[in-house]
Image (cartoon, grey):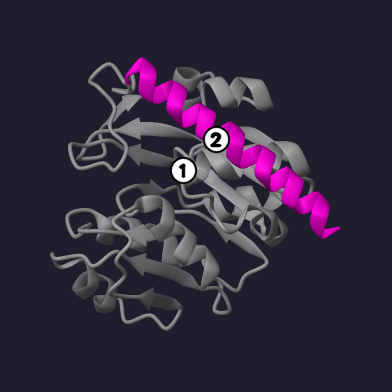
Amino acid sequence: MATYNGGKYIKDQIASILPQLKLSDELVISDDSSTDNTIEIIRSFNDKRIKIIENQQFKSPIFNFENALKHSDGDVIFLSDQDDKWSENKVEVMLSALQKYDLVVSNAFIGDGSLNIIRDSYFEWRKSRNGILKNFVRNSYLGCCMAFKRKVIQVALPFPKDIPMHDMWLGMISEIYFKPVFIKDKLMIYRRHDENATFLNEDFTSNETLSSKFKFRYNLFLAIVRRIINKKRSI
C-alpha cells in the first residue's frame, strides 16, 4: 500500500484487509510524508503484520508503490490503494487464480466517497481484458485490483522514470513475460473522490489531453524496449 494524506478513508481499507491475512503475512505501507493523521490511524491498529516505511519524499504514487514493493518479502503480492474497500473473499479468490496464472486482475464495483455504488462493473466501463495492444492504447490494468507472483517484480523493477503509472507498467511486463488473467469476480469497491491520485471526470473519462496521451505512450514504448534489451543482455 502506498499512502499520502489518506486519513479520511484509510481506516476502512486496512480494516477490510487485515482479517484476510495470515499471521505470517505482512501489510507493507510506504508513506510519502503525510501531513495528516494517516500514520496515527495506521498505528492505532497495533498489528505486528503492518510494516510502515515513513518519511519518504517521492511526491509520486508510482515510486511510492515501488518503494513498498522493494520492502515486501512475500511470494505473492497484492497492491492496495489507501481509500478503497476489499470484499471479504478477495484474498481467497485471487490466490486461487494465482495457482494457474502469474498476475490476476479482479473486477470491482466503482463507488463514491461514501462507498455508494455508482457503477456496477469496472471491467464493463473500461472494456478490461488481456492484450498488449489493447492495454497500450487503453489501459485496463488497475493496480488496486491486482495480485501477482514475486517473479513479476523481479522483471518489472526498477520502474522506469517516465512511465504513465505503475499498474500500466506491471500490466505490460506481465503481458510480455508472464501469464496474466482478468477474472470477473468483483472483489472490492474502487472508491472515486476529489482527492484521488488519478483523476477522472464525472463521466469517468480521463482528463488527459491528446498530446499527453501520446507522450505517455511514447515513453512507455521506449521503457518497454529498453527493458527487453536489458533483460536479453542479462541472460
- Identify the element where label 2 is drawn: helix
| Residue 170, image x, y percentages | 59, 45
Quarter placement of the C terminus:
bottom right
Say whether residue 160 is visible: yes
Q: Quadrant of residue 4?
A: bottom left
For the residue marked with disc 2, what is the amino acid? Leu
Q: Which region of the structure is painted magenta?
A: 209-235
Expressed as whole percent of the image width and height from the top left, the position of residue 53 reads 37, 75
x 77%, y 43%: residue: 177
Q: CA distance from mark 2 to mark 1?
A: 7 Å
Report the magenta stretch's main SS.
Answer: helix
Residue 178 visible here: no
Of the numbered discs 2 and 1, the one sitting upstream in the chain is 1
Residue 35 vs 131, above or below: the answer is below
Q: Residues within 10 Å of mark 1 (few under 14, many from 20)?
A: some
- Identify the disc placed on residue 162: 1
| Label 2 sits on residue | 220
Which is more toward the observer, 42 or 61?
Answer: 61
Residue at 23% x, 20% y is 202
**Can you give x and y, in whole percent of width and height, for residue 23 in the image?**
54, 79
Residue in the image at 80% along x and 59% along y: 234
Left or right, 51 with respect to 155, comes to: left
Residue at horizontal 53 percent and vertical 28 percent from the top: 218
Amino acid bearing label 1: Asp
Q: Tell me the element at label 1.
A: loop
Across and down, in percent, residue 169 comes to 56, 42
Q: Quadrant of the N terminus?
A: bottom left
Rendered position, 159 above or below 23: above
